[in-house]
Amino acid sequence: MSCIVGSGVPIGRAIASSPMGPPLTAPPVLSLFVPHPESRLCRELARGSAIVGLPLASGEVRVYFEGNVIGAVNLARYRDKAAQAASRMLHNYPAGYPTKAREDVDPREVVEIGRIEPTIGRIEITARPEDLSWWIDPADLADLGVTDRPGQHVRYKRMFDRTAALILVETGKCACEGCSGELTDAALSQGGWQFSRSCRCAWKASTINGQAYAAAIHAPVHTAPPAEPRKSSPGSTARDS
């Protein structure tokens, strides 16, 4: 994504690994992911689930996830869910905690958005807030220091010709300049996004405060280099992070 495809720090810094498994030594840092909007994981996991993981020598990514579907008070925040998923992954490492909330997935199923240092609880988010709000609640983004305050809207980019962009999106055409790709069916994405079959950017016509916008989540072909990571430590406020 600008975002949802290809945001974040590159994965794959294993120290030593078994032929098909994770690194043999417990890593100090785990990757944080969101599911790709068109993936099976996106359809099956609860929105807002924290996903942590490591690349395997097989080419897959081993992920542990926590969605707090039972509403536990101690797992209300995204950072708490991320810490819980990380602790399961590192339990009796490399075996991990025996749980159904674990899978080895194709790397195309997930998109890296940052990392977590489980021993000290520090989280670094490298993706931009507008690339995360479809999955992570604004209050959690603020808690992580990614937005200024709870309730902040995702930042929708107003197009150079908004009316033309809206018409293209509503008729199933990509609105990227110079792209003639057709868009996928919005019903295939949990967030209602439509993806260009050419450049892979995501589009959605949205109305905010009575104003129509063409929202875009751009693929790596259109994106600028990622911003400097924002660091968050336990107990810090959004502005202090």
Image (cartoon, grey):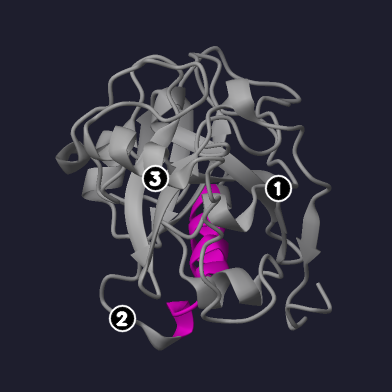
Tell me if mark 3 has few (under 14), some (14-19) or many (20+) residues whose alpha carbon lies within 10 angstroms of its own: few
Q: Which mark is residue 71?
A: 2
- Mark earlier in primary sequence (1, 2): 2
Which three-letter amino acid code belongs to the residue tagged 2? Gly
Tell me if mark 2 has few (under 14), some (14-19) or many (20+) residues whose alpha carbon lies within 10 angstroms of its own: few
Magenta stretch: includes residue 194: no
The residue wearing badge 1 is 126
- Mark earlier in primary sequence (3, 2): 2
Determine whether the residue tagged by mark 1 lies in a helix, strand or loop: loop
Determine whether the residue tagged by mark 3 lies in a helix, strand or loop: helix
Kindly report which numbered mark, 1 or 2, lies closer to the viewer in this rendering: 1
Residue 37 against residue 198 in the figure, above or below: below
Question: Cα distance, mark 3 to mark 2?
Answer: 42 Å
Quarter location, residue 186: top left
- Mark earlier in primary sequence (1, 3): 1
Q: Nearer the viewer, residue 226 or 235?
A: 226
Left or right of 172 in this view: 214? right
Which three-letter amino acid code belongs to the residue tagged 1? Thr
Discs 1, 2 touching: Cβ within 8 Å: no
- Residue 45 lies, in percent from the top left, at 28, 52
- First to last magenta residue range: 74-89
- Residue 60 lies, in percent from the top left, at 46, 21
Q: Residue 163 carries which label?
A: 3
**One can see residue 49 in this view:** yes
Residue at 64% across, 81% down = 149
Kindly report which numbered mark, 3 or 2, lies closer to the viewer in this rendering: 3
Q: From the image, give the main secondary structure of the stretch colored magenta.
A: helix
Determine whether the residue tagged by mark 2 lies in a helix, strand or loop: loop
Magenta stretch: includes residue 83: yes
